[in-house]
Amino acid sequence: MSQIFTPERLIVYVVASDDGLAPNVSADYCSLTVCKPVVRRVARPLKDWVVGMSTNKHGATKLIYTMQVEEKLPYNAFFKDSRFELKKPCLKRPFGDNFILNDEAVLPWACHYSKPDKMRANLKTPFSLVGQNYWYFGCNAPILPKNMWQTKLVQGPRRGHKIVDNPAHVAQFYHWIKKNFNTGVHGAPRDQSPFFS
């Protein structure tokens, strides 16, 4: 497993739908392959962490996940890499995110397979962000400490993303997550159907 690095920046967005697709935390890796094309475009491997916060409805101060960006792989490389074979969707795992090859969805079980508008948006940034060091909470999302509520970490009712590059705010988050939680999966996806749990 790779080393945990201190991030230079946090790229923060709201996880509107936490169903297991984006982020996807299977096969010992966290990946962000679909949705959030701008986040995927601006993320810098070995420098940035991605932070996914909850919605206002479920509690805007709750953390769904964070991952350190260790790799930024073109879709074809991600699809062909044997490490990510278990991320390919099938009947039992329809939320796998490894289904794009040569600019098209090639696996019919994929969630976005029959949604050309979503595929067009994804292909604007044909990269998958991957990290082996991640903290995924899903339905068990913890509340951030109150001293972080007034930072850019808490998004509220907004689309898009924010970049937290204030060194003090980045350090606060980094030390809080490392001190209080082990890496890995701490809960099931908040919005996943019980059929696939």
Image (tube, rainbow, N blue to C red):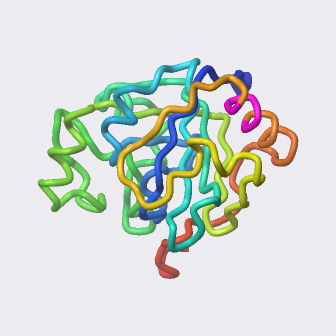
Give how far across and how far down residue 34 sits, in percent: 34, 46
Give how far across and how far down residue 182 sits, in percent: 81, 45
Quadrant (top left, top right, bottom left, bottom right) of the C terminus: bottom right
Q: Main structural element of the magenta stretch: helix, strand or loop?
A: helix
**Residue 76 versus residue 53: which sits nearer the camera?**
53
172 to 140, vertically: above or below: above
Q: Residue at x 57, y 62 (%)?
A: 60
Q: Residue furthest front?
A: 150
Give how far across and how far down residue 104 sits, in percent: 16, 42
Q: Residue furthest bottom?
A: 194
Horizontally, residue 69 falls left or right of residue 127, namely right
Q: Residue at x 33, y 30 (%)?
A: 127
Q: Residue at x 67, y 51 (%)?
A: 149
Range shown magenta: 169-173
Horizontally, residue 101 falls left or right of residue 148, namely left
Q: Specify whether residue 171 is painted magenta.
A: yes
**Residue 80 versus residue 103: which sits nearer the camera?**
103
Horizontally, residue 98 falls left or right of residue 117, namely right
Residue 64 image-quadrant placement: bottom right
Q: Specify whether residue 126 is painted magenta.
A: no
**Residue 111 versus residue 137: which sits nearer the camera?**
137
Q: Residue at x 54, y 37 (%)?
A: 50
| Label total for image | 0
Give how far across and how far down residue 109 sits, in percent: 29, 62
